[in-house]
Image (cartoon, grey):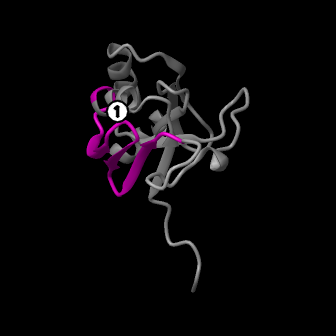
Amino acid sequence: MEGIERCDFIALIVNDIPRAVRFYEETLGLHLRFVQGEKYALFQVGGTKLALQIARSHGPDLPVTVDLVAPRADGVSVLVCCSVKNVDRWCATLRERDVPILREPADYPWGDREFSVRDPDGHVLIFYGPTRERAARSAA
C-alpha cells in the first residue's frame, strides 16, 4: 500500500547554529552527526534525525529558504516531543543545567507524564514518559 511509512526527520529553523548546537549537544546530550558551518547541523536521536538550519532568502546550498517558512505567530507552530525513561529525573537534570521549565511534570489522562522547555530559538520541547501510576503497574 502506498503512503507514509514513517516520520523520522525533523528540521527546526534557528537563528544561530552554534548557539543551538551547544543547547542540543551539551545541554540535552544529543548525538551530533554533522555540522555545515553556521548553516546546518544534524543530530541523531534514536531512529530519528533532528536538523537545525538557517533559512535564508536565497541560495542553492540550502534546501529551506524564507519563502517556505511559516510566519511566526505569538505561539508556536511545532512541538517536538521526546520520550525519556524518567520524566522527573530528566526535568531535574535540565533544571540543574539552568534550562527554564515551562510546564512542570504532570500526569495526563492519555497515560503520559510530561514537562516542557523552550530551546534558545523558542521551539517548545516536550519530554514525556509513562505516568507514575502506569510506570508502577509495569514495574510490578
SS assignment for the magenta stretch, majority: strand
Q: Is residue 3 left or right of residue 25?
A: right
Q: Position of residue 53 (x, y in %)?
A: 45, 42
Q: Is residue 100 visible?
A: yes
Q: Per the image, is 44 magenta?
A: yes
Query: In this picture, is 125 found above or below 104?
Result: below
Query: In this picture, is 83 found above or below 104?
Result: below
Q: Magenta part of the protein: which range? A: 26-55
Residue depicted at x 49% and y 48%: 11
**Three-letter amino acid code at the position of disc 1:** Val
Outermost residue to the front:
59
Q: Position of residue 29 (x, y in %)?
A: 28, 34
Outermost residue to the right:
73
Q: Which quarter of the image is occupied by the N terminus?
A: bottom right
Q: Position of residue 40 (x, y in %)?
A: 39, 43
Q: Nearer the viewer, residue 85 or 10?
A: 10
Residue depicted at x 71% and y 38%: 71
Q: Is residue 17 left or right of residue 12?
A: left
Mark 1: few/some/many CA within 10 Å (<14, 14-19, 20+): many
Q: Nearer the viewer, residue 82 or 8?
A: 8
The residue labelled by disc 1 is: 21
Q: Count all numbered tags in the image, as a single digit.
A: 1
